[in-house]
Amino acid sequence: MERLLSRIFEKLKNTKAGALVAFMFFIIAVLICIFGFWKTLFIVIFTIVGFIVGSFVFGDESRFKKFLDRILPPGRVR
């Protein structure tokens, strides 16, 4: 997964910002045409929240273990 992300970021470094933003707005426009404004807004908000939570929880392995210890009793599952 990390190798895939590094390849994507490497390609994004060589891409002009205007083309990237134009593609992003094209995707949003297609979503609005298909689903409507409120459903598209819902999808975009949950995607952003999922990215933030995922990077916070899974970004550091020790932080993820502490998170699991809070939810699950330590020693029973692991």
Image (cartoon, helix red, strand yellow):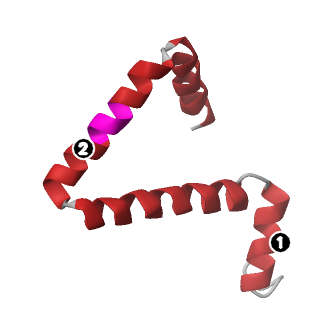
Q: Is residue 54 above or below residue 26?
A: below
Magenta segment: does it hold 2?
Answer: no
**The C terminus - image quarter:** bottom right
Q: Secondary structure under badge 2?
A: helix
Residue 66 - label: 1
Say which residue label 2 marks: 29
Magenta segment: does it hold 24?
Answer: yes
Whichever of callouts 2 and 1 sits on the residue coming sooner in the sequence is: 2
| Kind of residue at disc 1 | Lys
The residues bearing labels 2 and 1 have C-alpha atoms spaced at a distance of 40 Å
Report the magenta stretch's main SS. helix
Q: Residue at x 51, y 17 (%)?
A: 11
Residue 7 drawn at (x, y percent): 55, 22
| Most foreground residue, 33 or 67 | 33
Q: Is residue 21 above or below residue 1?
A: above
- Contact (CB < 8 A) between labels 2 and 1? no
| Most foreground residue, 38 or 76 | 38
| Kind of residue at disc 2 | Ala
Residue 74 - label: none
Residue extending farthest top:
14
User: Magenta segment, which residues?
Assistant: 23-27
